[in-house]
Amino acid sequence: MVNVIFWPLWSVPDGGTRSNLVAKVGGTNANKATTAKERNTPANFWLIYTTIVLFCSERKMKLEKFMVQYSMKKVLVLLCGLLLVGSVYGASPKDLIKDGTVVYELPYAGITPENPLYFLKQLRDQITEFLTRDSIKKAEFLLLSSDKRAHIAIILAQEGKTRQSVEVMADAEDRAMRIPDLLTESKKQGTAPSERFIYTLKLSNSKHKEIIQELAKMLPQGQDEQVLSALIDLNQRIAAELERL
């Protein structure tokens, strides 16, 4: 081996060439490296495999713990929501009075009669009511439009336009009065309104009564007393009709 290393490359024994000698020497080194690599490969493979398994197991445990906590939170929120809804809809309108005010949020009023385009709003409501054939859906629309007009009545009264506010409030009660007949007809056809909707109607009726009483305080002495008295009577009739549903 020593003789081979120190011989000149042009005098390689056995008719060999430079390339053959280099190949032999290089091949020997490559074979040694390959053998060492093969010896180290199983150990490296199992080390990497074990690390991956442990990492995935830890992640899985964290994910399962998170899912359990999330599920518990979701269940608790759902139970609290059901208890809250049950307590609200199990109460009567008289129970939802805070500081002398009925707790009922009126919808956005939109444009008022002062707006030149208000007549288009009225025309739109008439067309929508006419085209709505389902009795319960029509009742829901009438409730919405009635509450909007009650809100408009408040706005007009705050602006000092009390007479105009009384007229709008009369329109609101007229729309609300049509709802009980629609629901009675729907029940005859086999589709009863939900308890939630009935409760909302009762709450709306209580809110309208409160608004009418506030208007009576804001009006000058003797102005529209008969109209307001008629509105109070109409409101009470609506309340009695709703109790029979």
Image (tube, rainbow, N blue to C red):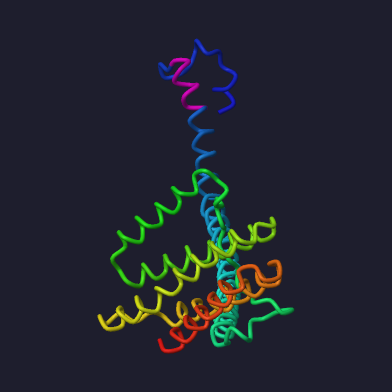
The quadrant holding residue 81 is bottom right
Main secondary-structure element of the magenta-colored stretch: helix
20 drawn magenta: yes
Q: x, y (%) of residue 29?
A: 54, 33
Query: Which residues make up the magenta segment?
Result: 17-25
Judge by depth and name the residue closer to the eye, 109 or 78.
109
Does residue 151 lie above or below 192 as drawn?
A: above
Q: Most extreme residue toward the left, as rendered? A: 189
Q: Check the picture and name the quadrant holding the C terminus.
A: bottom left
Residue at 66% from the left image edge and 72% from the top image edge: 216
Question: 108 left or right of 178?
Answer: right
**Is residue 74 toward the left or the right of residue 215 in the image?**
left
Front residue of 50 and 189: 189
Q: Residue 130: percent from the left, percent from the top?
A: 31, 60
Name the residue at the right extreme.
99
Instruction: Report the residue at 34% width, 75% height from top.
Output: 182
How far across and down, in percent of the image, does residue 138 sit? 36, 67
Q: Residue at x 64, y 61 (%)?
A: 162
Residue 242's place in the image compared with 35, above or below, is below
Q: Nearer the viewer, residue 177 or 166?
A: 166
Q: Is residue 12 shown above or below 242?
A: above
Within the magenta stretch, is there residue 97? no
How far from the left and from the top, in percent, is residue 13? 46, 18
Q: Residue furthest top?
A: 10
